[in-house]
Amino acid sequence: MDRLACYDCGETYPFGDAARCSCGEPLWFETDADAVSWPDAGGQDTDGTEGAEGDVAGRGSLWRYESVLPAATPVGLAAVAGGTPLLRAPSIEPASGPRMHLKLEGTNPTGSFKDRGTAVGIGRLDGPIGTVSHGNMALSVAAHAAADDREAVILVSEDTPDSRLAMIAQHDPHLFRVRGDYGRLYDDTLERDLGVAFLNSDSPLRVAGQKTVAYEICEAFRPDAPDAIVLPVSSGGQASGVWKALRELRGAGLIETTPRIYLAQAARCDPVARAFRRGAARVEPVTGAPTAAVSINNADPPSGNRALAAVDATDGAVVSVSEDALLAETDRIASDAGLSVEPSCAVATAGVRELTESGELDRDEDVAVIVTGSGYKYGTPGAEAPPVREIDREDVPAAVRELSA
Ligand SMILES: *Cc1c(COP(=O)(O)O)cnc(C)c1O
Ligand SMILES: [Zn+2]
């Protein structure tokens, strides 16, 4: 599995020869059709991390699908990425909407789906690794590098808050706060003579790792497939991975129908949704406004066109979620489903709400929603002083009894 291919023009390249296609579009790994099959034995608990020396966690992982990955199962932290649970949460399902199955990516080692891509990167590459991020990807790369005793280079933007820096810094990477056009760093780090392999948002290794989320979802629905998969989109890397998986599974006959891919963005920064509404095949950069959905505010997504192609090929759609709706949804998920998520994750279930209202999704359908991360890392937006009742110690028993009276 050493060839990269362009989804758009079909050009192929040996791995390592090109960072992107000569047509400008991103590349992904080609997968041998005969490598695509459901892993034979056992469920997610028993398989997957098998052979990973030192793994005592005993839970499933993305390495269950090693035969379709461009890396061998690594040891250590990377061996336990993926294998996340699927949770039905009827309390937050929209009335007359579809059944929502939440794929809880916040249970990954560093609390987001980014660990899937990092794990495959660690499994494949030697030496120092790096990334351009001040969010979940920075945390993921820093943590996995620490676990594997490697150097990590993390390039954060100038305005990264100290609390974020501290969280990343705890894993001891080389941390650079970069002045100047942060958006352009993506291109700068594609150069191959830096001595550091940069695992950016839509690098082929990352997309390969991220496709495993859709393998897990479809395997859980065997022998059927869900009607749709809904996820937030920023760079388009994860959407690309989901589409890649569905193409592989459909190509091998492991699913009989292809789930529709629905993408959700924050209305304040929604280049992919705008292109979708225009009926365009190409995403144009936008001037985004600040949003609470900080992990998905990419105004010029490097895999935007590919994400749009994924939607088009599967008859899906892209929705924009207003700031009010995404904040309300973040609250709802916490108070009604018991899950703390970032606003960047809440756009997906808010998207399901919109798609139900517009009649795209209905109550007979099963929808897998990728809950991309956790809310425990970044605090609760807008809640500096939650309403807490102050009471004296001797009044506690009476106050508690009163609750059930
Ligand atoms: C990175 C990230 C996304 C967006 O994924 P892309 O691959 O950049 O489209 C969504 N949610 C969370 C929590 C993220 O960290
Ligand atoms: Zn191409």
Image (tube, rainbow, N blue to C red):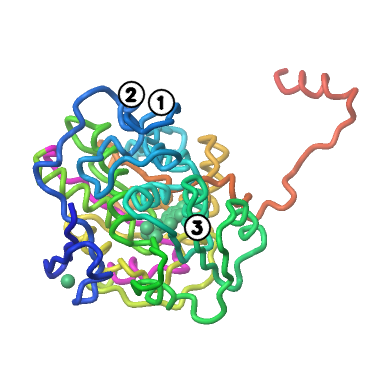
Q: Is residue 280 above or below residue 229?
A: below
Mark whose residue sits in front, 3 or 2: 3
| Residue 151: image tag | 3
Residue at image coords 74%, 43%: 387
Gap between marks 1 and 3, in whole Å? Answer: 28 Å
Q: Residues within 10 Å of mark 1 (few under 14, many from 20)?
A: some
- Residue 63, horizontal then vertical, whole percent: 31, 38
Asked if residue 249 lies left or right of residue 381, the reply is left
Q: Badges 3 and 2: C-beta atoms under 8 Å apart? A: no
Picture quarter with the C terminus? top right
Please give the range of residues in magenta: 254-276
Write down the residue under mark 2: 46
* Front-most of residues 185 and 113: 185
Asked whether mark 1 and ligand 1 are closer than 8 Å, the reply comes as no
Q: In the rendered structure, which amino acid carries the disc numbered 3? A: Glu
Query: Of the residues under marks 1 and 3, which one precedes in the sequence?
Result: 1
- Residue 95, horizontal then vertical, whole percent: 39, 39
Query: Of the residues under marks 3 and 2, which one precedes in the sequence?
Result: 2
Gap between marks 1 and 2, in whole Å? Answer: 7 Å
State whether residue 225 appears in this view. Answer: yes
Q: Quadrant of ligand 1?
A: bottom left
Q: Is residue 84 above or below residue 349?
A: above
Q: Is residue 296 above or below residue 42?
A: below
Q: Please tell me whether mark 3 sits on a helix, a strand or a loop.
A: loop
Asked if residue 135 lies left or right of residue 114, the reply is right
| Residue 279: image tag | none
Q: In the rendered structure, which amino acid carries the disc numbered 2? A: Thr
Gap between marks 3 and 2, in whole Å? Answer: 32 Å
Asked whether mark 2 and ligand 1 are closer than 8 Å, the reply comes as no
Q: Residues within 10 Å of mark 3 (few under 14, many from 20)?
A: some
Residue at image coords 16%, 43%: 249
